[in-house]
Amino acid sequence: MRRTVSSSLTSPVGDTASIVLSVAVAANTPCSEQLDITLDGAPLQYSELTSDGLTRLHVLHGVQPGMLEVNYSATIEGLGDPAPVTDLDRIVYTRPSRYCDSDTMMPVARATFGTKTGKDLLDAVSSWVGQQLTYVSGSSRPTDGAVQTYLARTGVCRDYAHLCIALLRALNVPARLVSVFAPGLSPMDFHAVAEAVVDDQWCVVDATAMAPRTSLVRIATGRDAADTSFMTTLSGIANLGQMTVTAVAEDGLPDDDVTLLTSLR
């Protein structure tokens, strides 16, 4: 499978800033790529850090006032290896986190899903969240977590993912959030899905069903949206201006049999 992806963003910098970008495909993705970062048209130096062996962060320090532009593109040839499940994963991704308050959601999870386990539990959670929530752009606040989403019954992709993760963790299933490029997504944007451990493998959970799981390309992986933001301003002033995302499966969108377990590759 050949997939081409890109993202472009502008950010007016109002005061000297330190900025972290997470727009590049994950470290385990077989690809050719290009990343250009400029300030008022002049190239900027950046450093790359890798978190958890998957997420690649591009760090900018001392960015002066001006117009920051970021342009990234990649071509992914074939499929990479699935991410391994480590002993540390089984600890970190069963704990409550900022947006996935699984401790609060535990009574709901137990009452709704009872003693389901494995694939049956994954299918039940994904189906339930997809039926209970209505996808409404702009309906949630950046500070909303799984509990607020459960009460409001509306949200966007990250809210669907947070609720799935919180319910799964409440039942002692390691689960995490992944930002992805998503061929077939409409309208096109960065997308967020959940991953959960079943039979010692990370399996995709996307209750929105807005793009084929088999076409997704991993970007960032973490406990929740706090770990996977495409742009973080550590200091100074830098606001998001315009952003464009593309993701295409060049041989056509693959089939996605929702009855099968699928891993990000």
Image (spheres, rainbow, N blue to C red):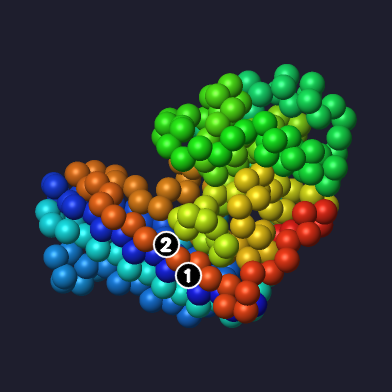
Amino acid type, mark 1:
Val
In the displayed structure, 212 sits above or below 234; it is below
Q: Residue at x 46, y 61 (%)?
A: 56
Q: Position of residue 81 (x, y in %)?
A: 68, 70
Q: Position of residue 34 (x, y in %)?
A: 38, 76
Tell me, for residue 198, which label it has, or none. Answer: none
Q: Secondary structure at mark 1?
A: strand
Give the CA separation, mark 1 to mark 2.
Answer: 8 Å
Of callouts 1 and 2, the N-terminal one: 1
Amino acid type, mark 2:
Val
Q: Position of residue 222 (x, y in %)?
A: 54, 47
Q: How many marks?
A: 2
How many residues crowd around disc 1 within 10 Å: few (fewer than 14), some, or many (20 or more)? many
Answer with the quarter of the image where residue 143 lies: top left
In the displayed structure, 260 sits above or below 104; it is below
Q: Classify the position of the C terminus by image quarter.
A: bottom right
Q: Residue at x 34, y 47 (%)?
A: 232
Q: Residue at x 85, y 39 (%)?
A: 117
Apparent side of residue 149 relative to residue 137 in the rendered image (left or right): right
Q: Position of residue 164 (x, y in %)?
A: 66, 38
Q: Secondary structure at mark 2?
A: strand
Q: Residue at x 50, y 67 (%)?
A: 247
Answer with the quarter of the image where residue 76 lies: bottom right
Residue on which the image places disc 1: 5
Q: Nearer the viewer, residue 112 or 20?
A: 112
How many residues crowd around disc 2 within 10 Å: few (fewer than 14), some, or many (20 or more)? some
Residue on which the image places disc 2: 245
